[in-house]
Image (tube, rainbow, N blue to C red):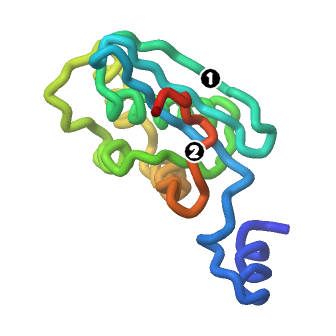
């Protein structure tokens, strides 16, 4: 069953598809601890509930970590020549991805590299990647599976 058929089946059953927690794709999350000195990002396969990557980036912001996590997920998909939906709980990171650049005054060694990578993706491929980028609905679905669990 493809994505469109799944949506039709939920809608036909009187359910709003946005109420259904995604079970396929990549969930990414960023983490910032110790006043931004200990940042990381990671990606989880929703289907396998398996960690795909977990990268410590040192000093940064949570939004930078989220942005880099999405870029990493895009890189994996390009490397494997596949497309799956990517979920993040950061509206800021989604905006930065759509603009192919951050708007952070904080500099980080990986930002320039990530922005250059995004600008180098051909438009048709980039559009397809961005079309599959979604905001995780924490209120409806709970914490994003890639969450580091540091919140108290």
The residue drawn where x is 55% and y is 55% is: 132
Work out whether 15 lies above or below 101: below
| Relative depth, front residue between 80 and 104 | 104
Residue 29 appears left or right of 82: left
Count of numbered circles in the view? 2
Residue 120, located in which quarter of the rendered image? top left
Residue located beneath label 1 in the image: 53
The residue drawn where x is 32% and y is 41% is: 100
Q: Which mark is residue 144?
A: 2
The residue drawn where x is 58% and y is 52% is: 142
Query: Residue 41: image x %, image y %?
Result: 49, 25
Residue 114, located in which quarter of the rendered image? top left
Q: Secondary structure at mark 1?
A: strand
The mark lying in front, picked from 1 and 2, is 2
Residue 24 appears left or right of 96: right
Sequence-first disc among 1 and 2: 1
| Relative depth, front residue between 90 and 4 | 90
> Seen from this angle, which residue lies furthest right?
1
Query: Residue 144: image x %, image y %?
Result: 57, 44
Residue 55 appears left or right of 91: right
Residue 51, located in which quarter of the rendered image? top right
Query: Residue 32: image x %, image y %?
Result: 37, 23
Q: Quadrant of the N terminus?
A: bottom right
């Amino acid at each position: 069953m493809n994505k469109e058929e799944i949506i039709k089946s939920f809608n036909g059953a009187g359910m709003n598809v946005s109420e259904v927690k995604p079970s396929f794709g990549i969930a990414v999350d960023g983490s910032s601890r110790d006043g931004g000195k200990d940042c990381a990002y990671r990606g989880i396969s929703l289907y396998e509930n398996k960690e795909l990557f977990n990268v410590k980036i040192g000093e940064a912001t949570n939004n930078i970590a989220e942005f880099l996590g999405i870029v990493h997920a895009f890189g994996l998909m390009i490397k494997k020549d596949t497309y799956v939906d990517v979920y993040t709980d950061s509206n800021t990171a989604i905006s930065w991805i759509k603009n192919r650049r951050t708007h952070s005054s904080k500099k980080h060694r990986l930002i320039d590299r990530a922005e250059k990578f995004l600008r180098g993706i051909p438009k048709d491929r980039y559009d397809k990647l961005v079309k599959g980028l979604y905001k995780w609905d924490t209120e409806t679905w709970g914490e994003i599976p890639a969450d580091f669990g540091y919140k108290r």
